[in-house]
Amino acid sequence: MKVIQVGIGGMGNAWLRAVLESPNVEFAGFVEVSDAIAAAQVERYHLDGSRIYRTLPEALAAVDADAVINVTPPQFHKEVSLTALEAGLPVLSEKPLADTFDAALAIVEKSNQTGLLHMVAQNRRYMVDTQTLKQALATPELGPIGAATVGFFRGPHFGGFREEMPYPLIIDMSIHHFDLMRFFLERDPVSVFGRSWNPPWSWYKGDASAAVTLEFEGGIYITYSASWCSQARDTSWNADWRFECANGVVVMQDEQVYTQLTGQEPVLVTPASPPRTGQAYLLQEFYEAVTTGKPPATTCQDNLKSLAIVFDVVKSFETGEVVKSSA
């Protein structure tokens, strides 16, 4: 399968490596608006510079491709994804699905109209620690889940578009954690309520800290406390999790998973051993979906439910009210 990758700097590095290491996927071409980034990546990855174009329409007119990988900033996701789908090519897009809910709906509508796959790269579902936690939650002796607490604290200095976003934590990062909530619980949210703020030392223009309570189907509550401008003691990118179950708890901290039944000692869970993780997993799942028709887990139609949490939380921030799920 031959792909055009749109955006080869930043997160594009992860996708360049994934494709270059894949036995099933290869590059037909690239799109990059920065000449400096293009030159640097040609040297770093030994890319064919003659196949780097400034726009996706230019690349589509010049090369034969089977699919598009969209690694642009969120505000460009709609334009790139619609262009690809209208050209008859399925899309594997970086998260979030889009920068606004209306833009996301437009992508889903175009995917439905064309019958073409649009898949979102929720790579954190497919890490060793999150796969281990997912398996641990299925332990029958623990009983049903009643509630969970999630903590995420890091202080990355990305520069660029993230530092200009109105809610950088929630829109660009928390989408991962909200998607993981749906993945772990296998349920969708009913309502959300939250508050956001920006500490005086923050280097972000928009609010980089938040506290959110989410009610999921079946009366399961999750409390989420997070900051993207924390100054020390970082958590994992996948956050720290504690699930309260009828007969014990499941905890993921510092990428290790523990179970503890009531009255017993905690047990360190043997890590899962998936054959692929992260972008490599997603790329293979995308390849199989395109070539065999096997539906992937994170289609845009399903991922819209995760993205809806993001914008429901933002609405709660701005209204100060409990917001019913819009998914």
Image: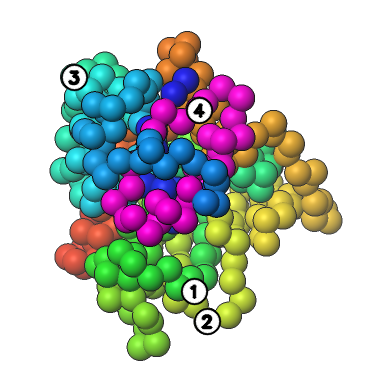
Residue identified by numbered label 2: 231
* Few, some or many residues within 10 Å of mark 3 (<14, 14–19, 20+): few
Tags 4 and 1 touching, CB below 8 Å = no
3D distance between C-alphas at marks 4 and 1: 35 Å
Left or right? Give the position of 202 relative to 261: left
Q: What stretch is highlighted in magenta?
A: 14-42
Please say if the residues under marks 4 and 3 sit with CB atoms less than 8 Å apart.
Answer: no
Distance (Cα) linking label 4 and label 2: 41 Å
Neighbourhood count class around disc 4 (C-alpha, 10 Å): few under 14, some 14–19, many 20 upward = some
Question: Which residue in the structure is indicated by mark 1?
Answer: 155
Q: Residues within 10 Å of mark 2 (few under 14, many from 20)?
A: few
Can residue 258 be seen in the rendering of this structure? yes
Q: Which of marks 2 and 1 is nearer the N terminus?
A: 1
The residues bearing labels 1 and 3 have C-alpha atoms spaced at a distance of 41 Å
Q: Residues within 10 Å of mark 1 (few under 14, many from 20)?
A: some
Going 43% across and 18% down the picture, which residue do you hit?
Answer: 290
Three-letter amino acid code at the position of disc 4: Glu
Work out whether mark 1 precedes mark 3 in sequence or the reverse, and give the earlier one: 3
Kindly state the secondary structure of the residue where label 4 is placed.
strand
Q: Is residue 175 above or below residue 285?
A: below
Marks 2 and 1, how far apart at CA: 6 Å
Badge 3 element? helix
Could you give the CA–CA distance between mark 4 and mark 3, rounded to whole angstroms? 28 Å
Confirm whether the magenta stretch covers residue 31.
Answer: yes
Of circles 4 and 3, which is in front? Answer: 4
Residue found farthest to the front: 50
Residue in view at x 46 percent, y 31 percent: 27
**Residue topped by disc 3:** 113
Look at discs 4 and 1 and give the one toward the viewer.
4
Q: Residue at x 67, y 61 (%)?
A: 254
Q: Name the residue under label 4.
A: 26
